Image (cartoon, grey):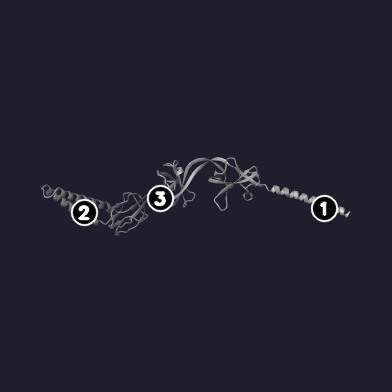
Amino acid sequence: MKKSLMFIIAAVAMVGCGANDKTSTTATAEESATAIKVCTAEVMEVENTETYTSEILPYRQNDITPAAQGLHIDQIMVDVGDRVKAGQVIVTLDPTNLSQMELNLATVEDTYNRMVPVHKAGGISDQQLTELKNTLDLQREMVENMRKNSVIKSPISGVVTARNFENGDLFASMPILHIMQIDKLKVMANVSEQYFPVVKVGQKVDIAVDIFPGETFEGKVSRINPALNAQTRTFAVEITIPNANERLRPGMYARATFNMGTHSGVMIDDVAVQKQAGSSERFVYVIKDGVAEFRFVRDGRRVGNKINILEGLEEGEQVATTSFIRLTNGKKVEIIGE
């Protein structure tokens, strides 16, 4: 009797263990499918914009220098920060040299005038009179140049940004003043050669500077270099920026954004694109027949919460947008929504 009871208990225990093993196996099978959400790749129109970094430059600038060195500066009439008009007198030079040259000119003119009747009377040859005439012409030219450089006018309207001498100094090689026109500015951008047929004179360009975050200034393409740089495969584009209020200044770091038109591109939710640790590679998990497939992609421009996939994904394919930690290549998944 006791033996029979023991056999019955053992049989019940074995049946119970078998049931537990079956339950555990079923639970493991259910847990192997990871619940995920997905989005579907779709073709959309993507705005093609390109941004190039550069430095803001004055629209025009001039170094103010006399034609000859070794002259004393009589008076500098402006200082750094002063505004000048085109044609305004800004520097005068010591008139001593000019006065001496004018006296020399008067002497040469007197000599020539006295020799003309002597030549007619046969007192000097044609060659001698010609030499006197050449000397007179040269002296006149030197005096005229000195007169022009004794009073220096600004060739442009702008602001003085540098002054390198004081009144009474002897002018050397360094410019006396530097003047910049800043009511308009310009940016030089080196644009990729693929856009050479796209960029046109008059095209609008958005300019952004760090000092005014979130704000853009409108510029326009004013000049396009007809030749490309063979080393960089880029071409230079000059962008003119109105600056009547002078909020922008030369030397500021700028980003110039060109609108290069639109193109059709595959778009997915940006959260679906992940960055591989330790590299710059991007990847997604493509879902096919309930299985996750690891796939590298090349991403492009973001538009809102969407991102353009340039390579690695086709229209209509589904990609995971959640549960990336639990996903691996070949992992079974259960789609629970989009």
C-beta proximity under 8 Å, tags 3 and 2: no
Which residue is under mark 1? 10
Question: Of circles 3 and 1, which is in front?
Answer: 1
Q: Is residue 309 visible?
A: no
Give the percent coordinates (x, y) of residue 213: 49, 51
Point out the tag, 2 or 1, that comes first from the N-terminus: 1
Eyeballing the image, is 197 above or below 168?
Answer: above
Q: Which structural element holds mark 2? A: helix
250 or 296: nearer the viewer: 296
Which residue is under mark 2? 102
Which residue is under mark 3? 57
Crowding at mark 1 (Cα within 10 Å: few <14, some 14-19, many 20+): few
299 or 46: nearer the viewer: 299
Q: Is residue 16 visible?
A: yes
Image point 55% across, 42% down: which residue?
266
Question: Of circles 2 and 1, which is in front?
Answer: 1
Give the percent coordinates (x, y) of residue 53: 46, 49
Which disc number belongs to residue 288? none
The answer to whether residue 46 is left or right of residue 60 is right
The answer to whether residue 335 is left or right of residue 212 is right
C-beta proximity under 8 Å, tags 3 and 1: no
Image point 49% across, 44% down: which residue?
49
Give the percent coordinates (x, y) of residue 255: 46, 49
